[in-house]
Image (tube, coloured by chain):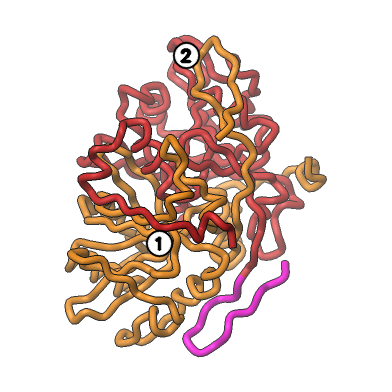
Chain colours: A orange, B red
Amino acid sequence: MNSQADSPFTAYFSQDIKALDKRFRRNLVNSLSGYKSVCLCGTSDPAGIHNLAIISSVFHVGAHPPLMGMLLRPPVVQRDTYENIARTGFFTLNHLHPGITHQGHQTSARYPEEVSEFEATGLTPLLVEGFPAPFVAESRVRIGLQVKERHHLISNSTVLVIGEVLYVSLPEAAVQEDGLIDLQATETVTVSGLDTYHVGEKLVRLSYAKPDEDLRELKD
Amino acid sequence: MNSQADSPFTAYFSQDIKALDKRFRRNLVNSLSGYKSVCLCGTSDPAGIHNLAIISSVFHVGAHPPLMGMLLRPPVVQRDTYENIARTGFFTLNHLHPGITHQGHQTSARYPEEVSEFEATGLTPLLVEGFPAPFVAESRVRIGLQVKERHHLISNSTVLVIGEVLYVSLPEAAVQEDGLIDLQATETVTVSGLDTYHVGEKLVRLSYAKPDEDLRELKD
């Protein structure tokens, strides 16, 4: 056990959280959900300008139909991504790996509207015939989605976008026999807070849990 | 670079995904979102029975007000957690660490309704005065939330729950000077797919991105 885990516990109540310094609160609350999925979201505007944004609020919604969700901040903040998705109905999600993490993070800079984050960061748009949003050529797991639902959250004016997975491209050898993607093979990156990037180190794969049966550790 | 990342790419189109074997599809689509946050969700029913469920769809919603979201499968599947949250309006989220990962996974077994997953798995309910849902004593990051919004997703009958963070308890030494939680210090666990658990290994922390400035690697 890590020695820091044995340290005294500290508690924050609602009023403490609200009274925190803004930057401290943003970092603390952003890391409460633990390791977050992080993807590059590719979109196109009607004029064909490719937009790319780093998104750390992607989550699994369901396997059948295959659905993923993501939360977008208010349209005034992530205007290009939001407007492109609203207009075209399509977007891509592309995993980060260590070789493109700096470039991925750099897409969060506020470039002028006419600048494509692809050009600004040196990432390469990859077009798949018939799919109206750009993928990231350097990414190893590339997902193409079509919007199915949008929900406006009242609590903080964010927008939840639910998309159906129409296309997946990834290294053949990273797909295990039973379909699980080996995220260590793809070197998929995960984020904590706003800016701290990690890779995963596998602990264990466990068998399906049943009330009166011991768990088994599964070998791949 | 991992050698598997250089292997040929394989592509799945919409019709391919729909035609996949059910188990293969479930594993593949579940791992598309990369590393997922995983927490134990504690609730109480009106009779005071404590329920505990492992949830891998937790995500950050906003820092001010402090909000987190999670997706619950249809009420027929996660009935206890869903009904308890609907009735009481409160729930807790508790990070996993390697020492409680087996017990956490075991909470997903379908126990009879009168059985508390705490007792069945040997985890200890921790009560905080005035908060009507149980925390997990063995967890190192414990979060108490109150429901603010619910959204029913039409696409697959899941329910999105948005909660406001009212309480946080964690090791003092794991909170960095600027508020970021050191998830390696808390040994926070992340999941891929349905059953594969990982810890994180930090790559880099990057400075705030600006259009005409090089990123710096930040030291903690």
Question: How far from the left and from the top, in percent, is residue B106?
Answer: 55, 23
How many discs mark residues in the rendered view?
2
Mark 1 chain = A
Q: Amino acid at mark 2?
A: Tyr
| Residues marked 1 and 2 touching at CB (< 8 Å) | no
The local secondary structure at tag 1 comes to strand
Report, in whole angstroms, how far the alpha carbon at label 1 lies from the one at label 2.
38 Å
Left or right of B2, for residue B27: left
Extreme residue in the right direction: A3
Tell me if residue B76 can be seen: yes
Overall secondary structure of the magenta stretch? loop
Left or right of B142, for residue B149: left
Extreme residue in the front direction: B8
Q: Residue beneath label 1, please?
A: A94
Q: Amino acid at mark 1?
A: Asn
Question: How far from the left and from the top, in percent, is residue B111?
Answer: 47, 13
What is the quadrant of the C terminus of chain A in the image? Answer: top right
Q: What's the mark number on residue B218?
A: none
Tell me if residue B163 can be seen: no
Does B180 appear above or below A210?
A: below
Q: What's the mark number on residue B111?
A: 2
**Residue A10 among those drawn in magenta:** no
> Between tags 1 and 2, which lies in front?
1
Residue at image location 18% in from the left, 66% down from the top: A88
Extreme residue in the bottom direction: B212
The span picked out in magenta is B206-220
Left or right of A31, for residue A71: left
Question: How far from the left and from the top, in percent, is residue B73?
Answer: 34, 32
Does B24 appear above or below B52?
A: below
